[in-house]
Amino acid sequence: MAEVSILEVVDLTQIFEPSGGLFGRGGKVRAVNGINFAIPAGQTLALVGESGCGKTTTIKLVLRLLKPTDGTVRFKGRDIWEMTRAEIKQFRQSVQAVFQDPWASLNPHMRVREIVAEPLIVVGGFTKAERQRRVDEVLEAVGLRSEHADNYPHEFSGGQRQRIAIATALSSRPELMVLDEPVSALDVSIRAQIMNLFKEIQERYGVSYLVVAHDLGTTRFLADDVSVMYLGRIVENGPADKLFRDPRHPYTEALLSAALKPDPDMPDKEIVLSGEQPSPINPPPGCAFHPRCHRLLDDRCEAITPPVFTLDGETRHVACFRAEGATSDVMNAG
Amino acid sequence: MTTSRTARADEPLLEVEDLSVSLRVAGEAVRAVDGVSFCVNRGETLGIVGESGSGKSMTASAIMGILPDKIAEIESGSIKLDGEDLLVLGERAMQKVRGRRIGMILQDPHTSLNPVFSSGEQIGEVFRMQAQAKARPSIKQRVVDALRDVHIAAPDVRSADFPHQMSGGMKQRVVGAIALAGDPDLVIADEPTTALDVTVQSQYLKLLKELQRERNIGMIFITHDFGVVARICDKVAVMYAGRIVEAGDVRTIFRTPAHPYTQALLATVPSVDDKPHRLPAIEGQPPSLFSIPEGCSFAPRCPKRMEMCSEAPPMLPSENEPSSGPHGAACWLLKDS
Amino acid sequence: MLAKLKGVPFFALAVLLIVVVVPGLFAELVAPHDPFAANLRNRMQPPLFLGGTTEFILGTDRLGRDMLSRIIYGARYVIVISLIGIILGAVLGSALGLVAGYYKGIVDALIMRTVDISFALPSVLLALAFATIWQPSFQLVIGVVVLVIWAFFARQVRAEALVISSKDYVARAQLVGSSDLRILTRHILPGVVNTIVVLATLQIGVVIMLEATLSFLGIGIPRPAPAWGLLVADGRQLIVTAWWISFFPGLAILLTVLSVNLLGDWLRDRLDPKRLRS
C-alpha cells in the first residue's frame, strides 16, 4: 500500500480575515478547518457538502489558486507550494477542472478549436497539426464531431457546451480532473449522458476525479470514496458503498435521506433537519452540527469538538461521539 | 373514469383549457406553450415537470397574467379561476387576483424580496392593501402570526430583519408568508427549492405541504425534479417542448409511466442505492423552440419511435381533459392498444 | 437585408459625410479658394443669400478670406484631432482599465483614484495652465484631449473587465497556466471591444467640443490655422456687423457633434452586449 496518491491533502486549513469594512469587527472565518483526504490514481473521490461548508475553498486550494493558511496539498507526492516553475507548468497541465455553469466557462469570443486547444497553446511545443489532431481526438472522446471545432460556443446547447468544457480539460492529457458540480446546471435529461461520459473518460484515460457536489445522489454513480463536509470539517469519509449503505454521521444520514427518491410512498421516512448550516464566522461550540442534530448523544456534543473515530480498519472515519463504541482507537482530537 | 368525475362534488378551482402562448423572438414567432389543459382542485397539488424550454414557467406566467407584454401573446385557450375567465380581466382586476386569490413563490429568494424593506413590512404591505386604513394596529400582530405560520422562530423579533440579515431558507419562508398573506385560493410555486440547500429543501417542502393542507389551498408546483414531485404532489403533468405529454395521479405516474419521455426521465434519476455500470440516459438534446420537430416532439430522442411518430403529433386522450381524470399520455404507442 | 438597415441614422451619416469627411479628406479639391489668402478688398463680404456673390458663398472674414474654404480646411483638424486624440486616449484608458479590473487590489485602487482625480480636474483650466507653461500647439491640444478622455475609457473598461475576469473561462485559462498577457488580450479584451468602440464614438463629440473651446480661448490650435473654434472666436467682435463669420463655423460644430452623438447612440444600441444576448 506504499503507492503514492495522485492527490493528498493533509491538515488543510484556510482562515479568512474579512477586512471588515467601515465598522471592522473582523472575525476570523475558518472556511476549511484541518481536512484530510487522498485520491489513489485512477479513482474518484466525492466531496459532498452544502453551501458554506468550505468545498469551494477546498477546490481553490487544490488547484493552487489559493495558498493555504496551514497544511499541505501534495500532487503525486510533491507539495504544490514547493514546486519549481517547471513543475508548476507541468502541474497546470496535469490538473484540470470542469465547472458547473457551461454558459460561463467557455469564452464566447473564441471558436471551439481555440478553446479546446488553449492548454496546448499555452504550454507550447505543439505544431498546429499536432494540436489539430489532439482537438479532433478529444472532441471525438466527448461525443462531438471535428466539424464542431469551427463553431462558437453560443451555437451549442447546455449539454454540448459542457462536453466542450470537458474536451478542453482533456486536451492536455490530465491525470486529475476537478469536477465542480459538473451536472447541476444541466437539464435533467442531459445529466445522465454527461455522467456516463465522465465514466467513459475515466475508463479510457485512467484519469482521477475529485467530484465536488452538494447532494449525494449525483455522486453515487461516479464515486469510489466519499467525504462529507460540514462547516469546514470532514465529518465522515469512507468507501462509497459502505457510506451509502450505512451512514454513521447524523449529517450524512440526513443528506442521504434528502436525496429524494422518486417514490411517492417513501417520503415519510425522511429525516428533516431543523434550521440551516450556521455561519462559519461564528460556529457553534462543540460539534458544529449539534444544534441541528436529530441524534444528540450527551453533553459532550455541545461542549467538545468530537474526535475522529476510525471504523472498519482504517477505511472509514467519523467525527461523532456516537461512533465511539464502534471503534478501537482515537486518531486525533481536533 | 366517469364515476370519479361525478363523484367530485365541487367545481375545480383552476381550469386551464387549450392554452397556447407564442413568443416573438428575433422577429420569429415560436410557440412556447401549445394546447395545454389541466385543472387544480382545492387542497390539491399539481406538479408540472419539465426541462428548460418545456413551457412550464410560461404556463405559470400566463395564469398569473405576468407574461412579458411585448414578446408574449396568448393565442388561444381559457384560464378559469372558480369559473371566472382570467384572460378577459383587465390589468387592475388582475392585480387584485394576484394579491388575494393567487399567491406566487419564485425560484430565487434573493431577488424576490425587496432589500430596502424589512420582512415584516413586506408581509404587512399585503395586509394593508386588503384591510384599508382602519385596521392598522392589528397588522403588526398579523405579520407576526404569518411569520410564525412559516415556522420562523422568534417571529416578533424577526419581522424587523432585512433580507440581507436572513439565510436563503429563511428568505424563502418569508416569500412563502407573503404569498399566503392574501389568503389565496391558489399558490403557484415556480422551482421554489432549487436555490436552497438539500437539507433546507426538505424542511421547506414539508412546510409548504402542511400549509397547503391546513388552508385547503390549491397549488401548482413547477419543478424539474421528480424527487420533489414525489414528495409534495398529488397529480403530475409532464411537459415537453410546450406540450403536456403525460398527466395523471402521482402514484400512477411513478408506478406505471406511459410516455417514453416520462419513463426515461424517471430512469435517469440517479439512485443512492446502487451503482450501475452506466446510467440509463436519454440521447440528444431537448429541441429548440425554433425547430420543434413535426409530429411528436420527443420522437427524435425516443427509444421506441415508430414511423408515424414523425408524421403527426399524438394528442392527450380527450376523455382525459381537463385532465383531472386518472391518467393519459400523448404517445402513438398507446393509441394502438 | 432591409430589416438590417432599420434604424441606421442615415441623416447623421449624410451630415458627417458632407460637413466633415469629404471636406476634410479632399479639401484641396473641394475648397474654392486658398483658406489663407487674404485680400482686404473683399473683407467682410456677406454670404450669397444676403446679397453676396457666388464667389464667396458663405461670405468672407475681416481679412477677406473665404469662409467656406476655411471651414472646409478646418474639417481636417476635426478629423485629425478626433482620430489621434481618441485613439491615444482609448488605448491608454482601456489598457489601464483592463489592468485595474484584472489585477484588482492596490493596482486597481491606484488607477481608479487617478481616474477620480482626472474627473475632478476642470479640463479647460488645465489647458490654460499648460498653455502658460508651453506654447499652444497641436501637440498640446492632443495632450489635453487624451488627459480628459482616458478616464472615461478606464472607468468603463475596468467595470466590464471586473465582470469578465470573474467568469469561469478566465479561471480556467489561469488554471492551464495562461500568461496574464494572454488572458488580458485573448479572454478579457474581446469582451470589452464593443464597449470601447461605442465609447470612442460617443467621445468624438466631446473631443470636438473640447478642441473648439480651446481654440476659441486661444489656447488650442495656433492661428492662422482655420480650426472651427478659432473661426468662431474670430467673428466674436463682429457678431453685430458680420454675424456669419461666427455663425457658419458654429453651425458646423453643432451639426457634427449632433450627428456623431446620434451615431454613437445607434452603435451602442446595436453593439451593447447585453442587448445582443437577448
Image (cartoon, rainbow, N blue to C red):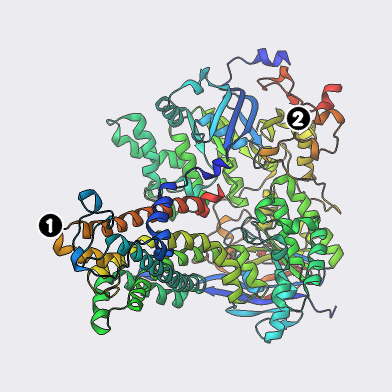
Task: Depth check: give the residue in front, A200 or C185.
Answer: C185
Residue C175 placement (x, y as % from top left): 66, 72
Task: Depth check: give the residue in front, A42 or B66.
Answer: B66
Q: Residue C85 appears in which quarter of the rendering?
A: bottom left
Indicate the quadrant containing the N terminus of chain C: top left, top right, bottom left or bottom right: top right
The amino acid marked with disc number 2 is Thr
Query: In the image, which disc is placed on residue C39?
Result: none
Residue drawn 48% across and 20% down? B88
Q: Which residue is mark 1?
A: C240
Q: Residue A215 appears in which quarter of the rendering?
A: bottom right
Q: Which residue is mark 2?
A: B252
Q: Chain of mark 2?
A: B
Provide the secondary structure element on which disc 1 rests. Answer: loop
Question: How many marks do you count on the picture?
Answer: 2
Residue C257 placement (x, y as % from top left): 34, 57
Q: Is residue C154 above or below residue B209?
A: below
Mark 2, Cα crowd under 10 Å, few <14 / some 14-19 / many 20+, is some
Q: Chain of mark 1?
A: C
Left or right of A22? Residue C187 is right
Residue farthest left in this picture: C240
Q: Residue C200 appears in which quarter of the rendering?
A: bottom left
